[in-house]
C-alpha cells in the first residue's frame, strides 16, 4: 500500500563503487523526482521525469544517471562514488509538472566510506 | 538567485503556540508549501498557500503575504510529537506550465514538556 517506495533504505559502500537506488510509485502520478538531502538537512532537487522524459537536470555530476523505464519507476545509478555523495536521497512523485504537492519515499541513506 | 530563509532551530513548550517564519526571494512564484519531517523520515505535506491570507487546518495554520515574500506556519496546542523539522518550499515556475519546488533549509522544532 506504500505510495512511493524506494530501496534500499540504507546503503554503505566504498569510494569508487557503483550503486543503484530504485523507486516506484503507485499513485498514478506522471512526474517523479530525485532529491538529495545533505547533512545540514538541505533538500535539493536533482532530476525530474515526466512520463519517462527528463525535464529537470539540476547541474548534477554526470556520474549520476537516472533511468525511468515507465512513469511509475525512476531509478538512480551512481558511478564512481565519492565521499561527498554521502547523503539521504529521496524519491518523490507529483500529479503534474507544475510544482504540485510532492509525495516522498522514505529515503535512502547513502554512506560512502 | 533563489533564496528561502527560515530559522535553523526553535524551542517551545508543550501546549504552547509557535510561529515558524519563512521569507523568500525567488525568480517567480506559484505558491508556497510547508512540509513536516520527523528525524529519519520522509517529508510529509502540511499546507499550501497560493493566495494571500491564512489557511487553517486543525492545529496548524499557514499564512502568506506575496508582496512581502513572507509566510509563517502557526502550530497551536503543541504536542511532543510536533518535534520535527518544518520545511518551507516555494513553487518556482520554469516556463510553460512547468514548475518545481525549492526548499528552505528547514526549522528544527523541539517541543519540551
Image (tube, coloured by chain):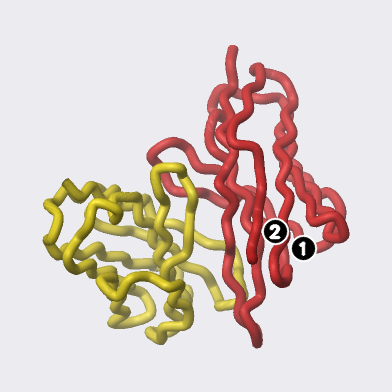
Chain colours: A yellow, B red
Identify residue for label 1: B50
Disc count in the image?
Answer: 2
Quadrant in the picture for residue B76: top right
Quadrant in the picture for residue B65: bottom right
Q: Is residue B25 above or below residue B88?
A: below
| SS assignment at label 2 | strand
Q: Give B18 or A29, whichever is nearer the viewer.
A: B18
Q: Provide residue A81's location: percent of width, then percent of height.
A: 20, 60
Q: Which mark is residue B32?
A: 2
The alpha-carbon separation of the residues under discs 2 and 1 comes to: 6 Å
Quadrant showing the C terminus of chain B: top right
Q: Provide residue B56's location: percent of width, then percent of height.
A: 78, 45
Q: Residue at x 46, y 67 (%)?
A: A93
Q: Residue at x 59, y 47 (%)?
A: B87
Q: Give B10 or B34, whichever is nearer the viewer.
A: B10
Q: Is residue A40 above or below residue A105?
A: above
| SS assignment at label 1 | loop
Q: Is residue A86 left or right of residue A60?
A: left
CB under 8 Å between callouts 2 and 1?
yes
Q: Provide residue B7's location: percent of width, then percent of height.
A: 65, 37
Q: Is residue A3 visible?
A: no
For mark 2, name the chain.
Answer: B
Amino acid at each position: 500500500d506504500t505510495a512511493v517506495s524506494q530501496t534500499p533504505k540504507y546503503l554503505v559502500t566504498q569510494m569508487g563503487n557503483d550503486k543503484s537506488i530504485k523507486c516506484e510509485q503507485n499513485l498514478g502520478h506522471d512526474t517523479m523526482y530525485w532529491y538529495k538531502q545533505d547533512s545540514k538537512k538541505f533538500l535539493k532537487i536533482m532530476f525530474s521525469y515526466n512520463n519517462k522524459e527528463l525535464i529537470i537536470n539540476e547541474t548534477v555530476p554526470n556520474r549520476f544517471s537516472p533511468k525511468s523505464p515507465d512513469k511509475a519507476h525512476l531509478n538512480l545509478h551512481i558511478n564512481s562514488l565519492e565521499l561527498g555523495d554521502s547523503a539521504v536521497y529521496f524519491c518523490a512523485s507529483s500529479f503534474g509538472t507544475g510544482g504540485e504537492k510532492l509525495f516522498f519515499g522514505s529515503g535512502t541513506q547513502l554512506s560512502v566510506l | 538567485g533563489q533564496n528561502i530563509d527560515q530559522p535553523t532551530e526553535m524551542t517551545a513548550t508543550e501546549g504552547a503556540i509557535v510561529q515558524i517564519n519563512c521569507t523568500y526571494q525567488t525568480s517567480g512564484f506559484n505558491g508556497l508549501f510547508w512540509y513536516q519531517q520527523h528525524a529519519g523520515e520522509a517529508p510529509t505535506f502540511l499546507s499550501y498557500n497560493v493566495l494571500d491570507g491564512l489557511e487553517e487546518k486543525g492545529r496548524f495554520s499557514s499564512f502568506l503575504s506575496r508582496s512581502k515574500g513572507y509566510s509563517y506556519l502557526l502550530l497551536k496546542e503543541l504536542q511532543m510529537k510536533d518535534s520535527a523539522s518544518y520545511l518551507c518550499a516555494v513553487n518556482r515556475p520554469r516556463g510553460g506550465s512547468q514548475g518545481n519546488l525549492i526548499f528552505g533549509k528547514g526549522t528544527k522544532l523541539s517541543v519540551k514538556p
